[in-house]
Amino acid sequence: MTILVTGGAGFIGSHLCSLLMDHGHHVVCLDNFFTGRKQNIAHLVGNPQFELVEHDVTRPFDFAVDQIYNLACPASPVHYQKTPVETVRTCVLGAINCLELAKRRGGIKVLQASTSEVYGDPEVHPQPETYRGSVNPIGPRACYDEGKRCAETLFFDYHRQHALPIKVARIFNTYGPNMSWDDGRVISNFITQALRGEDITVYGDGSQSRSFCYVSDLIAGLYRMMETDGFTGPVNLGNPAEATVMQLAQKIISLTGSQSAIVRKPLPQDDPKQRCPEITLAKEKLDWRPTVDLEVGLKKTIDYFRSVV
Ligand code: NAD
Ligand code: UDP
């Protein structure tokens, strides 16, 4: 098959392009390099199975493809809040352009990379897919949270109105090689700081939790989701092993052998206090579960960062 991956030069997208090519598919990677980097896909450029198209997902596009993965969107709060109007446009117009292409191609499968942020600052813990979330619609995170929620709405409306075979995957915090050292997310920040001997910046008191999924597990889940028939989701994809931000800082200091000190910085507005995926649905429908535990995944990620920072 020929498969379109929007956001294919980003962190998750670059791993997904490689996985799809390993399965024998041709990949069209569409990216405007807002947060993605040519070096993430340098090993794929020149391969006849790979085509790179520099394009903004908010502008219409047309390719003779058989499946679409829509990943184009900045994922780090630092980046998606820098130009929030563009973030909303990317989420909404990007979804419409992917869905329209899927429709024009006669109803091909189209997968949306949604997010645990649709649950906002959750009052239900862990979060099942049935939980409708607690999002501040006018806060600084809303451009991303509400943009992604609207994208989910569009996917389900195209499914109802045009019978499109849609797939919605709600991705929880994912980490691994190809994350940008300076993208502002917690794992890339902490590893970079630890390796450079700089202070580790814990926002708030560090008691807020996240559940971190290694990228190889995540893309295996996306692939399985796409391979199913008749299952739209939404489905949570994440690793339910939960850790506080303070525990994460201590683990990274210990794994890197760093002398860095932990310092406190203000907690950003609307920062979710807890987050953990309920993954029963993914286990049942996709026979998927994460296999890489945090320590193993962090060691691989630290090795990668040692070569780039
Ligand atoms: P990333 O920032 O590394 O990758 C996003 C890619 O999209 C980049 O290559 C960027 O250049 C591209 N992009 C952004 N706006 C674009 C536009 N208008 N047109 C074309 N390309 C555009 O982020 P990531 O972590 O790889 O995330 C990929 C997807 O997964 C995103 O949709 C994100 O919302 C979703 N997701 C990621 C996580 C995570 O923890 N990494 C969690 C939940 C959801
Ligand atoms: N965080 C932190 N220090 C940092 C970067 C992030 O303490 O240098 C915290 C952040 O406040 C949040 C958690 O780590 O509570 C995860 O942040 P990230 O931006 O990685 O992802 P998200 O908030 O979108 O889950």
Image: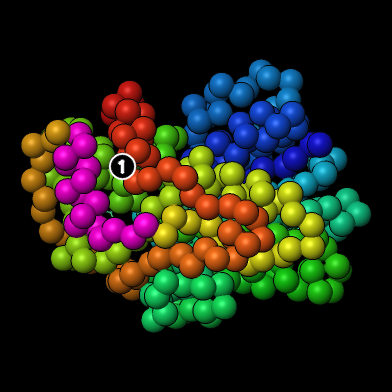
Task: Identify the residue at horizontal 74%, vertical 54% (top origin).
Answer: 228
* Number of numbered discs on residues: 1
Residue type beneath disc 1: Glu
Query: Where in the figure is residue 242, as x and y percent of width and height?
Result: 34, 60
Quadrant occupied by the N terminus: top right
Q: Residue 226: tell me if it is visible.
A: yes
Q: Residue at x 74, y 63 (%)?
A: 231
For the point 86% across and 67% down, the residue is 163
| Magenta part of the chain | 241-256
Front residue of 239 and 159: 239
Above or below for 246 versus 45: below
Q: Main secondary structure of the magenta part?
A: helix
- Judged left or right of residue 142, residue 153 is right
Residue 256 screen position, x and y as percent: 20, 34
Task: Give the x, y percent position of residue 279.
Answer: 52, 63
Residue depicted at x 50% and y 30%: 40
Q: Which residue is mark 1?
A: 295
**219 up-or-down from 154: above or below:** above
Secondary structure beneath disc 1? helix
Q: Can residue 83 be seen in this snapshot?
A: no
Q: Is residue 143 left or right of residue 309?
A: right
Give the quarter of the image for residue 91. bottom right
